Image (cartoon, rainbow, N blue to C red):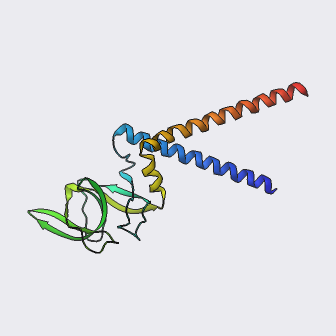
């Protein structure tokens, strides 16, 4: 009985692993083909690469952000992702001001001592964090974006499919041989 349960758990775990690897491969391939981050229903997944927003989300997590549109508005306390100095940054808005007729935002990482030295304009904002985070998956997502990680994500599903095909062929061969003997 315990052996059957262990076998069932092993099969479920293997199946889940295969699904996760295939989904990761799909995300990486679609981002390579489109030249950007894949968008699903107006949301993007981003990897957290620093601890500036801890404890809201940990380094190595992934977060979902809702992409901005022409009707997007932000207020004090919102967590936004924006482009600054060639990097994507996700920080909390601490102040909203009008400057030269446009709205600008002061931001701060929750875990940082002081506010950021820059102001964020509407055109620099990518989107707003919507409360969805998964710890540690960002490490894998970040690695999978590298050349080696991308190659592994193509190689591993192919290898798993090859192993599955060989097992199926061997199983069919054994059934045929058992039928000939009996």
Q: Foreground: 50 or 44?
A: 50
Q: Foreground: 138 or 69?
A: 138
Residue 134 percent across, percent down from the top left: 47, 60
The answer to whether residue 140 is visible is yes
Q: Quadrant of residue 63?
A: bottom left
Residue 73 placement, left or right of 63: left
Residue 147 placement, left or right of 4: left
Residue 23 placement, left or right of 89: right
Query: Quadrant where the C terminus lies?
Result: top right
Residue at the top extreme of this rendering: 180
Residue at the left extreme of this rendering: 100
Q: Quadrant of residue 106?
A: bottom left
For the image, the number of numbered tags is: 0
Residue 147 percent across, percent down from the top left: 42, 41
Residue at 48% x, 59% y is: 136
| Vertical order, 124 against 25 (above or below) | below
Query: Quadrant where the N terminus lies?
Result: bottom right
Residue at 35% x, 61% y is: 129
The answer to whether residue 68 is visible is no
| Vertical order, 29 against 99 (above or below) | above
Residue at 49% x, 46% y is: 24
Q: Quadrant of residue 82?
A: bottom left
Residue at the right extreme of this rendering: 182
Residue 91 percent across, percent down from the top left: 30, 65
Residue at 74% x, 31% y is: 170
Residue 72 percent across, percent down from the top left: 25, 58
Residue at the front extreme of this rendering: 148
């Amino acid at each position: 009985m315990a052996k059957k349960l262990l076998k069932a758990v092993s099969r479920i775990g293997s199946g889940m692993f295969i699904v996760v690897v295939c989904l990761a491969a799909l995300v990486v391939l679609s981002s390579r083909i489109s030249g950007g981050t894949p968008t699903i229903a107006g949301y993007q997944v981003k990897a957290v690469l620093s601890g500036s927003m801890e404890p809201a989300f940990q380094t190595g997590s992934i977060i979902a952000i809702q992409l901005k549109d022409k009707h997007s508005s932000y207020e004090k306390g919102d967590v936004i992702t924006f482009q600054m100095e060639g990097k994507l940054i996700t920080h909390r808005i601490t102040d909203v001001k009008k400057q030269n007729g446009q709205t600008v935002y002061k931001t701060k990482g929750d875990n940082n001592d002081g506010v950021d030295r820059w102001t964020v304009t509407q055109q620099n904002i990518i989107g707003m964090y919507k409360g969805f985070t998964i710890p540690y998956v960002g490490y894998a997502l970040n690695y999978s974006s590298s050349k080696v990680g991308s190659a592994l994500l193509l190689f591993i599903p192919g290898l798993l499919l090859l192993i599955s095909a060989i097992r199926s062929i061997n199983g069919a061969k054994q059934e045929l041989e058992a039928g000939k003997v009996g």
